[in-house]
Amino acid sequence: MNPPVTIRVLGRRPTLVGAQTLAKPTVGSLAMLLFIVLHVPLGLAMKLVPYVSTLHALAALAIALLLILCRYPTPWVVAACAYLVGSETLWRMTDARVFWEYGKYALFLIVAVALLFRRQRTSTYLPLLYFALLLPGALLTLIAVPNFGDLRQILSFELSGPLAYAACGYFLVGRLLTRNDVIRCLVAMLAPVAGVAAVTFFGIRTTEIQFGASANADSSGGFGPNQVAAALALGMVVCFLLLTGKNGSLLWKASLVALFVWFGIQAALTFSRSGLYYSGAAILAGTAFLVKDVRRFTLVLLFGLALVVVSRFVIAPQLDAFTGGAFERRYARTDLSGRGDLMEGDLLVFLQHPVLGVGVGLAREARKQAVGVSNKSHTEFTRLLSEHGFLGAVALALMLTMGIQAVMRQSFGWPRAFSAALLAFGLVFMTGSAMRLAIPAFLLPLAGVRIWLPRMGRATAQRRALPAFQHYPARAFNPIQRVTTTR
């Protein structure tokens, strides 16, 4: 057995690595691929038998809490959170018997319990400050809405996303994870998306669909096209990150390419253009930070060029023929589907109430008076301005600041591409879907984790990451071996 090696971290007692150690468990490419594929029949079972969907939703939360209570390593808890985020759309479209914002509150509960039981310090309090800036707007709503049922529904719909974002940011930003930890997290997020794609494919094959000039619920598994397209777009981005971040077998890479194309086709058939925009922006942002890795950057460019050619001359004509010419007409449109009017109304409301805004969830009526449109806002940035005023602008600035710091503090190469892709996806998602799903509430903080690479050096990685990283539970492992701290 190798002799113990002492690692000194500033401000901490010496740490011995090598004494009474256990090997870190590994998950191979074949096992991860099998895990993803199994969610295809699982998704169909959840669609056909809603009780299976309900059981799945409850089991996902229970297992995540069990990982915490049994003192499993923090990376496994993060992977459980990722799985929950990827499953949220699947639960909604398969009619799981849970409340609408279950995904966001379940995410918040997992993080809160993890923080309580692990007592891990954070590297930043900005996420908490972000949420605190939104509380005065909630007080305005408390005053303006006397009915408790309406008040609960308004606050839950509008603030559940920011609450989950603040909790995840406090828990994840600055957290040190290995590349394998991040890969495991991405696979956990990808697997439920395969179930979403299976449900949408099943719906298209078994339903008589009339394609028109707008988003189509029938081709989206009978659910909201915007959210389904966003979930499939998330799957495309995860496939991109796995292809560029993990050296696997030919079967693994071919499977990821097949999933990427499948998700793209299903997202396109929802006729919700936003999904392809989200994935395109994230992939471009990630590719931009792979420039220094000549090999990966060249492969991405060649793959992208081949995909564009195949999509333009093979896939698009087939989809256009399948939809009776509606596909080309739909994606030739460049309008904002009414979101432009909503954004204009939010800005006018902000100018009329610049200090505290009109209150959480109260912008609809004010917007109706301003521009004659009373739909719920689809853009989180303008919603913050109209409902929270100047404080919302400060909260938005904090969110953008944390996002930029997440990318700039990451190591060059794939780690920085990872953070940039997640940041871009989360921000672009909020321009078209606000915080309807838990996706941005988790992806933006996940972009802020520190990815440890072997060439960086363990002690250096600890100093550059969260100061309390050594405070793993007794049963936890570190990226190399289990750590025993001297007393």
Image: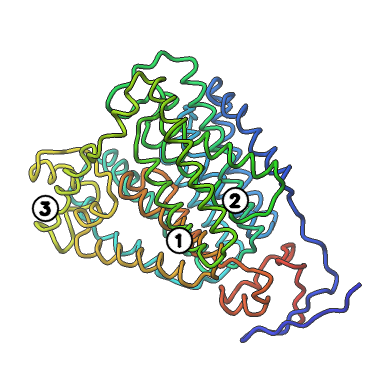
Nearest-to-viewer mark from 2 and 3: 2
Instruction: Indicate which disc residue 288 carries.
Output: 1
Observer-nearest of 32 and 271: 271
| Residue at numbered disc 3 | 348
| Mark 3–mark 1 distance (CA, rounded to whole Å) | 36 Å
| Residue at numbered disc 2 | 242
Could you tell which of marks 1 and 2 lies nearer the N-terminus?
2
Q: Taking 139 as reference, is 232 left or right?
A: right
Coordinates of residue 234 in the picture (x, y in percent): 48, 44
Check the image and report above or below for 390 versus 232: below
Could you tell which of marks 3 and 1 lies nearer the N-terminus?
1
Check the image and report above or below for 255 versus 130: above
Instruction: Indicate which disc residue 353 carries.
Output: none
Could you tell which of marks 2 and 3 lies nearer the N-terminus?
2
| Mark 1–mark 2 distance (CA, rounded to whole Å) | 16 Å
Please report contact status of discs 1 and 2: CB closer than 8 Å, yes or no: no
Name the residue type under label 1. Ala
Nearest-to-viewer mark from 3 and 1: 1
Observer-nearest of 98 and 242: 242
Quarter that holds the C terminus: bottom right
Check the image and report above or below for 5 versus 270: below
Secondary structure found at label 2: helix
Check the image and report above or below for 450 versus 361: below
Residue appearing at x 50%, y 66% in the figure: 173
